[in-house]
Image: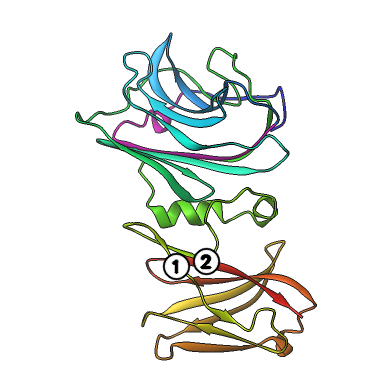
Amino acid sequence: MDTHCYARVPDAPSLDIEDEITVAAWVKPAKRSSQKIIAKGDSKIADGYELSLLSTGKASFRINQQTSETYKINSTTQYPIDGTWIHIAATFKGTNMKIFINGVQNKSLTFAIPASVGPNTLPLVIGAAVDETSNFQGSIDEVSVYNYALQANEIYALASGSEEKNNTAARVRTENIQINNEGVLQYKTHVYPNPADNTLFVELTHAKKSIISITDMNGRLLHRMLATGENNEIAIDLGELNLEKGLYILCIQSSDSIRKTKFLKK
């Protein structure tokens, strides 16, 4: 979806999410202004939920905007306006609200009084407010709405799914980290040598089964293998893969974490 366009999704029971929610989208803003990404609610019309950008340069998520200014969260970092894609996601469950930038938790708030999202009969609008104002200036892609609060590792996987956008994303601490179901942990995935010639060694610091994969920068899968957890070091023969010189992404996925790092093939 590009500048000045927006989409309206008719009201449906599946969109009236009350108990917990996740909203997410890739955006490429063209300017700093007050503009909506996802809106099913309006401060002048009805409670609901919305994900938006503020004129201050921050991303924002709020619920029940007609009856209260309490349940909202703004990012601590500013969104880019230089043609860079950024992934924004937000979750709400009970008393807890979180916002994620490029797959990493940016801010979390805990409220004193539990709440549920107010249902309404409004359409869900992408790229504008429900009254067709506050139009988004730029591009929007891969919009997601879930009826539950995604875990941190699920948010990271969601933000890591588009290599085309990741190549230009203003990522915040997303490389060489581990994200588990309890939050975000800084973690260094040790691969060596880097740059690599014929053999790449991967150190595993846990005794869990993992899937190790290598993709090119366009997301094309080039290699996939299972690490049983019996060895803490895996050797990958790059010569057998016939990789050309260039940059590649190595991903280690276990039952509770996803880790990614880049390596250079000489």
- Relative to 165, does residue 260 appear above or below in the rendering? below
Q: Amino acid at mark 1?
A: Tyr
Q: Judge from the rendering whether residue 220 lies leftward or rightward of residue 102; answer left or right.
A: right
Residue in the image at 71% along x and 84% along y: 241
**Label 1: how many Cα within 10 Å (few below 14, some 14–19, many 20+):** few
Q: Position of residue 24 (x, y in %)?
A: 50, 40
Residue in the image at 58% along x and 51% along y: 171
Q: Which residue is mark 1?
A: 187
- Relative to 165, does residue 58 appear above or below in the rendering? above
- The magenta stretch is 11-29
Q: Which residue is mark 2?
A: 176
Q: Give the image quarter of residue 69.
A: top left
Q: Position of residue 51 (x, y in %)?
A: 49, 30
Q: Is residue 43 visible?
A: yes
Residue in the image at 42% along x and 17% along y: 121
Q: For the view shown, which residue lies furthest in the top direction?
A: 44
**Label 2: how many Cα within 10 Å (few below 14, some 14–19, many 20+):** some
Q: Is residue 145 visible?
A: no
